[in-house]
Every structure is written in structure tokens, then in C-alpha cells.
Amino acid sequence: MEATLEVVKREGRGKNEARRLRVGGRIPGVLYGTRKGGKAPEGVAVAVDPKAVLRILHSESGANTLITLTLDGTESRVMVKEYQLDPVTQELLHADFYQLAMDRAITVTVPIAIRGEAKGVKQQGGLLDFVTREVQVQCLPADIPEHIDIDVSELMLHQAVRLRDLPESPKWKPLNDPDTMLVHVVVPKAEEAAVTAEAEAAAAPAAPAEPEVIKKGKVEKEGEEPKK
């Protein structure tokens, strides 16, 4: 997804300036340029409409949205670098952007999306355990996927999908460990506990039979009548 955003330069800094901006319907932000000669880019202080930024952050591509940003009549391609929310009201307080070189690969975090209903759930009564919900990928800015789809329709009980099982893409490369488990079908915990208890009971050794208790008494001599 792509979006457009217009920002203006701001001169002041500090809490008073931020408060003044919010009264006018804007929030402070910083626009960072591309890295040059190995040096960290310098930031330009800007003011931006928080509602426009929130629309981008709440879109399907979220912070991975490619933005055409306009500053003083000049357009550049940027992405959201960082943002700050009020912990109580969840209002946007600050947003930073970084300029992209469209011919240079970047690293982004992309969510995993599950498609279909696993046979291990539908036919065998298992549970689908969503282990890894996002992965890091390397790609050009124009090739950032909104999400990575996993089809779990044929997944049976005790089967899993790992990162290495995904089809290769010519546009992006995963950076996580290939053995990273993404999703698997497991036995429900209650059922697993019952099976374990039964197995432990079957494996336990049988209790030894109690020996017959013989009462001790005085041995009667031959010819003597037993005492009453």
C-alpha cells in the first residue's frame, strides 16, 4: 500500500512547542534523510497531521506503508521510523520518518496470515497453534509484502509449517532461522493430559499382594486337649 502525506517545517522545540502544535491540530516529528558516506542522516524538524499518520498506521500495511511525503513542495519516499502514543488516551504524540533510496534493500517486519482450515483441526479435533506471527524480510521498498500467506488446509495433527517450507519469492528474502516454526496442529491440553495420565497408570508396576497373616499360638503337644 502507498499513501501521501504533507508536512511543514517547525522552528521551535520542547514541550511548549509540542503543546502549541497540538492546539493547531498538528504534532511534532522528524524527517531523517538517507545515510551518506557512512554518516548518520541529519533530521529535519517537521509538524504533521496526527490523523493522517494514524490512518497510515491503522492500514493493512501499517508502518510498512510506502509514503510519498511533501515538504516545501519537494516530494520524497519515506516510511514511518518510530512513533509515540499517549499510554492512556492512545493519541499520537510524535512521529519520525526516514527517507528511502528506492534502489536499496531494506529490512522490515512482515506479519504472517493464515489461510484455510487445517484438516487436523476439522477432522481430528486438534488445535492450531500460531507460534510465529511475524518475520523479518529483506527487499526493495517497492516490494514490501503487506503480509505472508500460509495455507494450512492440508495440515494434519502433529504437523507443522516452518519458514523453510514457504515458497521462495523473487522479491523478498526471509532473514529468520529457516527452522523457525510458524504454525502447527497440536492435541488439546485437556485431552493430552488425559492420555498422559492413562499412559502413566498403565506403565505403573502392579502393587504386590499382601501376605497372609498367620496368627501365632502355642503348639499343642500330642495327646493334650487344646485349651479353651
Image (tube, rainbow, N blue to C red):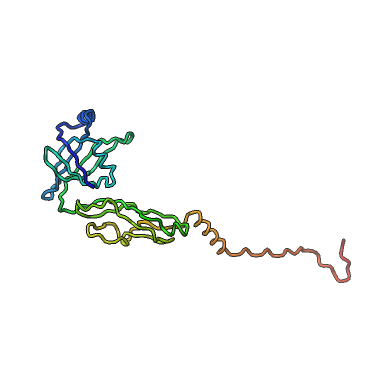
What percent of the width, then of the height, locates residue 128? Answer: 41, 55
184 on left or right of 190: left
Compared across the picture, whether 185 is left or right of 193 comes to left
View extreme (bottom): residue = 222
**Residue 20: x %, y % from top left:** 21, 28
Q: Position of residue 22 (x, y in %)?
A: 23, 30
- Position of 151 relative to 33 (above/below): below
The total number of labels drawn is 0
Does residue 73 sit above or below 21 in this rendering? Answer: below
* Residue 13 quadrant: top left
Q: Quadrant of the C terminus?
A: bottom right
Q: Position of residue 152 (x, y in %)?
A: 37, 58
Q: In this view of the protein, which residue sits in the foreground, 153 or 40?
A: 153
Q: State the image quarter where residue 122 is shown.
A: bottom left
Q: Residue at the location (52% across, 59% down)? A: 195
